[in-house]
Amino acid sequence: MLKSIIFVLLIISLVLCGCSDTVEEETIFSLSKEQQEHYANVIEEELNSFYWYYDDSKLEYYETTIPNDLDLFKATKETGFDMSNYVGRTAVCYTAQLQHFNTETAGTAYFYFIKDNLVGLCYSPLANPNKFVELNTRNVFTHSANIEKIESDEYYSLNYNQSSINVLANGFCSENRRENETFVIDKTDTALNIYRYRSNGMRRYKVINSSQLKGLKPISAAFDNNGGIAVICGNIISGYEELETEKMFSERVIFFDKNFNRLSMDLELNSGSYSCVSFYDDKLVLINDKNTELYGFNNGNYIKESSFYTNIQAVDFKQTDLDNNGISECVITDNKDIYVFRIDNNKMNCIWRTNVSREYYYGYIYTADLNDDGAQEIYICDNTGTAVRYVLGENGIIAKNSDIVYGQRIYAGDFNNDGKYDYILFDGEKGTICIRE
């Protein structure tokens, strides 16, 4: 009898062991073809409404639960969807790979659906992948940007004295502020026109002509901190089969003192690809092909101290402090995109950029706080000759142009050196200079 009982127990234990080793089949979540088509159509409509490109061949989906994530809720709400009421609900999440206008990857968009209805939408940018962002911010700060101010809703301060102006219709490339006056440089194909603003207005003060430039043509010019001028000069080279158009080849940098007299020192350039001169603090900045070179002044000459490869052949370079926190930014353009860099610990790091990558911008960069909110705006013209205003947003720098009419140009500075920003507005051929009270 005892043997029979032991045998039965052994059989039962074997059966139970066999059950415990059995692996249940995993349930695979899937959508019908009709559901997938519905979701794909919604995604296309939404991304088109925000003017986003995306790769429709790489749509993916999965089943998820709406998390209690405040950053996610903030991004989706700014895009137009309040997800906070759906915490814990089962949803279908679709992902789409976003693309910039230049077809570079912008990030991953997340679409949350409950019962076929879209309840949430935002994206995680490639520039800062640990962040959720609303779809209105196309170009996002990198994680190291740490911008401390954002732009207010006002376009301008209301307190400006206005008068007509008939010079500088194409703007100016550099500005030097002195006691109760400011000088600006208007670079032409053959000379530099120096204009001075005093209480009686903006008037041409001096011309630096070809003979003072040793028979060369000016490529780029900038004031130093003491009011002197550095000019990259060169000649037009044509006739080479590999050149489809004429090209300016740089030869040397010529220097002038604050009274605009030529100095005896020149800086001979070792290549013909220098395109821009500027200053960063007391350092001379030269753009050589896609490198940014910094030079220190020592024993009567400028000596190259560092070179940063940026992959940008800049045509304008401006040092500024966009958020007024005491840390300088460098705003750069190659006429294809706008870039914001910081130079720190012998590194030059890009913290923000546009992603156009075609000939889109025209003229020079201007930075100014024209609405007195403590954050500077960036002004430049597009290839139609119309001003583009970029302002600091919470997640990136965004265009804010609803008040700008086609053909209007804005050239900002502090023309009377009173610590308040002024600007020149050209509406077609009609110019107005606006001096802050």
Image: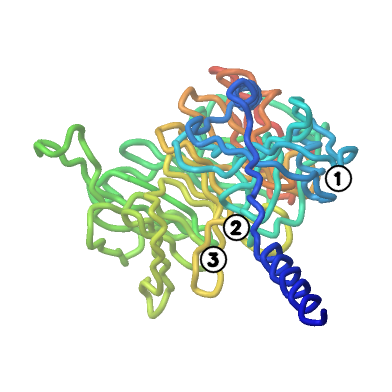
Examine the rendered structure and indicate whether residue 235 appears above or below residue 310. Answer: above
Q: How is the image coloured?
A: rainbow
Q: In the rendered structure, which disc, 1 or 2, sits on the residue that comes first in sequence?
A: 1
Mark 1, residue position: 88
Residue 191, image quadrant? top left
Mark 3, residue position: 343
* Residue 57 seen in the figure: yes
Q: Secondary structure at mark 2?
A: strand
Q: Residue 386: give x, y in percent of width and height.
A: 55, 25
Q: Which mark is residue 171?
A: none
Residue type, mark 1 in image: Gly
Mark 1 surroundings within 10 Å by alpha-carbon count, few (fewer than 14), some (14 through 19), many (20 or more): few
Quadrant location of the C terminus in the rendered image: top right
Examine the rendered structure and indicate whether residue 20 appears above or below residue 424. Answer: below
Q: Residue 128: give x, y in percent of width and height.
A: 62, 54
Q: In the rendered structure, which disc, 3 or 2, sits on the residue that comes first in sequence?
A: 2
Residue 225, image quadrant? bottom right
Residue contact between numbered discs 3 and 2, judged by CB atoms under 8 Å: no
